[in-house]
């Protein structure tokens, strides 16, 4: 018998946050396992960056729009159930990989399976919640990403230490992947019982081309908005991918210790940032680009103490500040997009947005930092790479957010309907 949550749709938003948390946790588990994987498979930073970025993101980005076309024919909850199960299987496959190529294949499968999660989950939240509460509902969903990053780093580090202490014939990092993948399987069964919200627009005949036409018509506002969102994603993905290794190399921590500090900073600061992003976007109305500018500026300024602080405490505090800022920017990016799309095209618009930011932000960021780190080399190579690559990205993002903020009050490119 299907179940549903009714109080202003917050139950649906909480469940979608849990889905997001587990998906992001699976995605970033590799970040805490970099050092043992490098040692066993004999990989460099560039190869690790390739696994964290392009191997996951190119397939995932290209698959978003086909997945949304499938979502027009499937109930969104059923699609989420299938993709969560597939993501869990891909995570288990990471633990079974014996070569770099097999690990890359598992990451590509994960990218494919997770491609529908963002648009489908946001589609359910938007349909289930009233307009006055949607910003907070979406911020709950995006907060799931912060919890997922934290749980991957803290839980992954703890599991790595546990399996190392137990010994055995199987490498501890492999057991971490298998255990994490198994956790998501029961959730996929739970999603099969979720009823579709009555407020979801049918729109099965609507084409992706209609969403493209609306976005092109609104390009003075949406082009800089999407660029700012892309920069925020690149910064966030890169920091999550490399922050633990940064603390290991600069401050001599073990992987479990680094995972604990980075995970706590990202989990707590991320929850604060996503909550603030939702509140600010709801209060400022079409002022979501302003929250993106605020968040990107904070995230960019925090890079200097993060990479240059002589003490661990300063680096962790800076990482928390960067996470708060980028969480505000990411939330503003998704909320601002919903405000500029017609209700019937929001799922497609979200799909296009996520395709672009995944292909360019998620794919390029971790790989660019890893490649720059390997090229610079030396004990501060990774810190220098993070400062240079992400600092330049942050400045570009701030400029784009400022342009989007100036265009936010422009008329919407359609008449009638819900804004």
Image (tube, rainbow, N blue to C red):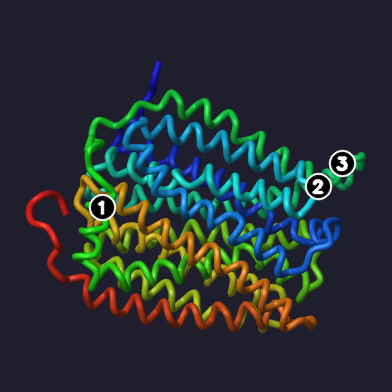
Residue 402 percent across, percent down from the top left: 31, 79
| Residue sitting nearer the eye, 399 or 100 | 100
Element type where label 1 sits in the image: helix
Mark pair 2, 1: CA separation: 42 Å
Q: What residue is shown with label 1?
A: 209
Q: What residue is shown with label 2?
A: 98
Residue 73 percent across, percent down from the top left: 33, 32
Neighbour tally class for label 3: few under 14, some 14-19, many 20 plus, Cα within 10 Å: few
Residue 413 is left or right of residue 22, and the answer is left
Element type where label 3 sits in the image: loop
Mark pair 3, 1: CA separation: 50 Å
Mark toward the start of the polypeptide (3 vs 2): 2
Q: Which residue is rendered at x = 32% and y = 59% of the image?
A: 279
Mark toward the start of the polypeptide (2 vs 1): 2
Q: Is residue 37 above or below residue 187?
A: below
Q: What residue is shown with label 3?
A: 170
Q: Is residue 215 above or below residue 292?
A: above
Q: Quadrant of residue 401?
A: bottom left
Q: Which residue is rendered at x = 27% and y = 40% of the image?
A: 127
Q: Quadrant of residue 195?
A: top left
């Amino acid at each position: 018998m299907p179940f549903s949550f009714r109080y202003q749709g917050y139950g649906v938003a909480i469940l979608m946050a849990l889905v997001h948390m587990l998906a992001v946790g699976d995605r970033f588990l590799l970040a805490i396992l970099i050092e043992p994987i490098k040692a066993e498979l004999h990989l460099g930073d560039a190869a690790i960056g390739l696994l964290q970025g392009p191997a996951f993101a190119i397939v995932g980005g290209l698959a978003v729009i086909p997945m949304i076309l499938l979502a027009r024919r499937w109930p969104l909850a059923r699609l989420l159930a299938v993709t969560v199960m597939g993501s869990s299987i891909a995570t288990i496959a990471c633990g079974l990989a014996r070569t770099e190529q097999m690990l890359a294949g598992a990451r590509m499968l994960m990218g494919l399976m997770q491609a529908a999660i963002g648009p489908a989950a946001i589609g359910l939240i938007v349909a289930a919640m009233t307009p006055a509460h949607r910003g907070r509902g979406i911020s709950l969903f995006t907060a799931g990403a912060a919890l997922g990053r934290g749980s991957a780093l803290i839980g992954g580090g703890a599991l790595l230490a546990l399996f190392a202490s137990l010994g055995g014939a199987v490498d501890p990092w492999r057991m971490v992947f298998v255990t994490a993948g198994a956790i998501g399987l029961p959730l996929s069964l739970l999603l099969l019982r979720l009823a579709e919200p009555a407020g979801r627009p049918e729109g099965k005949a609507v084409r992706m081309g209609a969403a493209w036409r609306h976005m092109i018509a609104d390009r003075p506002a949406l082009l800089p908005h999407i660029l700012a969102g892309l920069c925020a994603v690149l910064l966030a993905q890169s920091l999550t991918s490399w922050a633990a290794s940064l603390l290991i190399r600069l401050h001599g921590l073990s992987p479990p210790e680094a995972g604990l500090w980075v995970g706590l900073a990202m989990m707590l600061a991320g929850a604060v940032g996503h909550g603030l992003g939702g509140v600010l976007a709801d209060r400022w109305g079409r002022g979501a680009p302003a929250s993106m500018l605020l968040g990107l500026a904070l995230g960019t300024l925090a890079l200097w103490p993060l990479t240059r602080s002589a003490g661990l405490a300063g680096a962790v505090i800076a990482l928390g500040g960067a996470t708060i800022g980028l969480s505000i920017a990411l939330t503003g990016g998704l909320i601002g997009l919903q405000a500029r799309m017609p209700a019937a095209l929001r799922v497609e618009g979200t799909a296009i947005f996520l395709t672009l930011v995944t292909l360019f932000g998620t794919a390029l960021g971790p790989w660019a930092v890893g490649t720059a780190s390997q090229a610079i080399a030396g004990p501060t190579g990774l810190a220098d790479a993070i400062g240079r690559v992400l600092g330049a990205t942050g400045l570009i993002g701030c400029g784009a957010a400022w342009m989007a903020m100036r265009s936010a009050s422009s008329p919407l490119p359609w008449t009638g309907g819900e804004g």
